[in-house]
Image (cartoon, coloured by chain):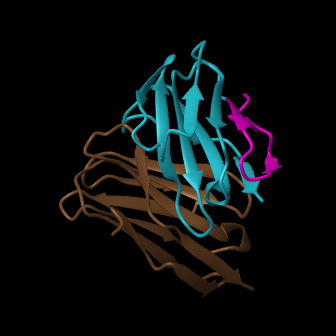
Amino acid sequence: SQELEQSPQSLIVQEGKNLTINCTSSKTLYGLYWYKQKYGEGLIFLMMLQKGGEEKSHEKITAKLDEKKQQSSLHITASQPSHAGIYLCGADIQGAQKLVFGQGTRLTINP
Amino acid sequence: GAGVSQTPSNKVTEKGKYVELRCDPISGHTALYWYRQSLGQGPEFLIYFQGTGAADDSGLPNDRFFAVRPEGSVSTLKIQRTERGDSAVYLCASSLGSGGSYEQYFGPGTRLTVT
């Protein structure tokens, strides 16, 4: 089983709609990262969350960390075609100083 | 400034051959990580360096895989006697330090295909 589970695995939304992607860990989180990846390209760093209850925003993307539940959510408001891609959560689990990743969520934005 | 770069971007090799994949980290980043990503999956950790030494190589799948970082900057991932199952995108990342407090910045990856 995966140490980090992302849901949903795939998401299709209409342009302009809001959406949420979730990431749940089976172990204690010491840092939670969100990345975006386009096909055939590397990972683009979006945000890092470290403390329980922490929330960060960049443009129309907001990420939150619920330390007690060992979960993070990524919320996109008023989605645009440029938001399409694969979103990956990565975590430093139990202070191991390496990242474990979820399997990714493929986001498609329909015009 | 320049990001993490990786060469080659694509590598096709025959089963049984030896390959080297190179990573140039962001200048000043002391920590360097190698990950492997198979189609439809998230990256999987292989090895990380703090300076010149391999601090954790627990993700290397077997002894055909080896990585070096002799001067604490550029790193080379070496794969001997390649197998078809080694086909994947190999990603390199670097950070100012190691641990969950530091962002890891990724390169574009090297797509390895073993025929």
Please check the rendered image and state whether residue B4 is part of the magenta-colored stretch, yes or no. Answer: yes
Question: Which chain, by letter, is cyan?
Answer: B
| Nearer to us in this view, A6 or B88 | B88
Residue A23 position in % (x across, y down): 38, 67
| Extreme residue in the left direction | A68
Magenta stretch bounds: B1-23
Question: Which chain, by letter, is brown?
Answer: A
> Relative to residue B79, is residue B51 drawn left or right?
left
Residue A62 position in % (x across, y down): 46, 61
Task: Let me know if residue B95 appears in the view.
Answer: yes
Above/below status of A91 relative to A105: above
| Nearer to us in this view, A66 or A38 | A38
| Extreme residue in the top direction | B71
Task: Let me know if residue A78 appears in the view.
Answer: no
**In percent of the image, x 60 and y 59: which residue is there?**
A36
Above/below status of A7 relative to B110: below
Residue A61 position in % (x across, y down): 53, 62
Please check the rendered image and state whether residue B44 is part of the magenta-colored stretch, yes or no. Answer: no
> Relative to residue B16, is residue A50 drawn left or right?
left
**In percent of the image, x 79 and y 52: which residue is there?**
B14
Q: Point out the image quarter for the C terminus of chain A.
A: bottom right
**In percent of the image, x 66 and y 79: which residue is there?**
A108
| Nearer to us in this view, A46 or A91 | A91
> Relative to residue B17, is residue B85 drawn left or right?
left
Picture quarter containing residue A60?
bottom right
Residue A53 position in % (x across, y down): 26, 55
**In percent of the image, x 68 and y 73: which residue is there?**
A80
